[in-house]
Image: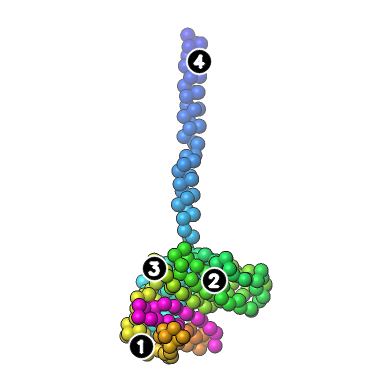
Amino acid sequence: MKRKIVAVLLAVFSTFSVLTACSSKPNSSTTQQKNTVATQEPTLPPNINPDKELARVSTIDKFFNARSITLNEKVLRFSFDDAQMKYVGFTLAQDNEIPEKIAVGETVENIKYITPSGLTAYVSATNQTTVNTDYTKCKYSTLRLIKGECNDVTLHLPNKLTWDSKVDVIKKEYGQPKEESQNENDDTVLTYKGQSKTEEYTMELTTDENGIKEVFIEFRAV
């Protein structure tokens, strides 16, 4: 009788051990799925303004304080950097010639980024740190967006201006530009400027009959 009881207890103990081991074993497919979801897009970089409405509806007069635009509903806030460019969908282009280290106080211009659909951006990287460093540690003070054939990257400038905004709409929202000219392609170039005691911004919009083709934004110390 005692032997039967011992056998039963051993059987129960063995079953319990197997169940415990199974329940504690991680589900590899679930873990893999979570990892896949986590790497689908970059996370929100630190020190970035996540307020899409502020970026979209801020007037040109308030742009100096808002310092932001949206690309595909993601906020790009000045001054920005490599992490924020990746966050809004850009990757560094292959044809860049960037020095391995940027000297303290130096600026490297025309660093090229692209999106999969063909939107091109050029930025200027300034080393504001106290040591020579690579471009990923630098702040970007200028941004030039070239639309090209790209049709699936939604742009919102202050007052909700988009790629489709034409000259008359731009002037209605922003007023008369500081400068207006024609380039070699007969495109209209509108230049707006604003200034505080320590800094000024320039926004240059290149347009044709279809709307905005190119956007240039710069913040500069005065």
Circle 2 crowding by C-alpha within 10 Å: few under 14, some 14–19, many from 20: many
- The span from disc 2 to disc 1 (Cα, nearest Å) is 31 Å
Question: Residue drawn 48% across and 19% down?
Answer: 11
Which residue lies most toward the front here? 185
In the image shown, does 72 or 24 lie closer to the viewer? 72
The residue tagged with tag 1: helix, strand or loop?
loop
Residue found at the very far top of the displayed protein: 1
Question: Which label sits on residue 203?
Answer: none
Q: Quadrant of the C terminus?
A: bottom right
Q: Compute the Cα span from label 3 to label 1.
A: 27 Å
The residue lying at 47 percent from left, 75 percent from top is 145
Mark 3 or mark 2: whose residue is earlier in sequence: 2
Q: Which residue is mark 3?
A: 151
In what element is the residue under mark 2? strand
Residue that numbered label 1 is attached to = 175
Q: Residue at x 49, y 36 (%)?
A: 24
Instruction: Say what amino acid the circle numbered 1 marks.
Output: Gly
- Amino acid identity at mark 3: Asn
Name above or below for residue 208 compared with residue 147: below
Q: Of discs 3 and 4, which sits in the foreground?
A: 3
Q: Residue 139, how many percent across, how many down? A: 56, 73
Nearer the viewer's eye, disc 4 or disc 2? 2
On the image, the x and y values in percent for residue 136 come to 59, 68
Indicate whether 160 appears above or below 187.
above
Q: Nearer the viewer, residue 119 or 33?
A: 119
Determine which residue is flagged by label 2: 112
**Which of marks 2 and 4 precedes in the sequence?**
4
Residue that numbered label 4 is attached to: 6
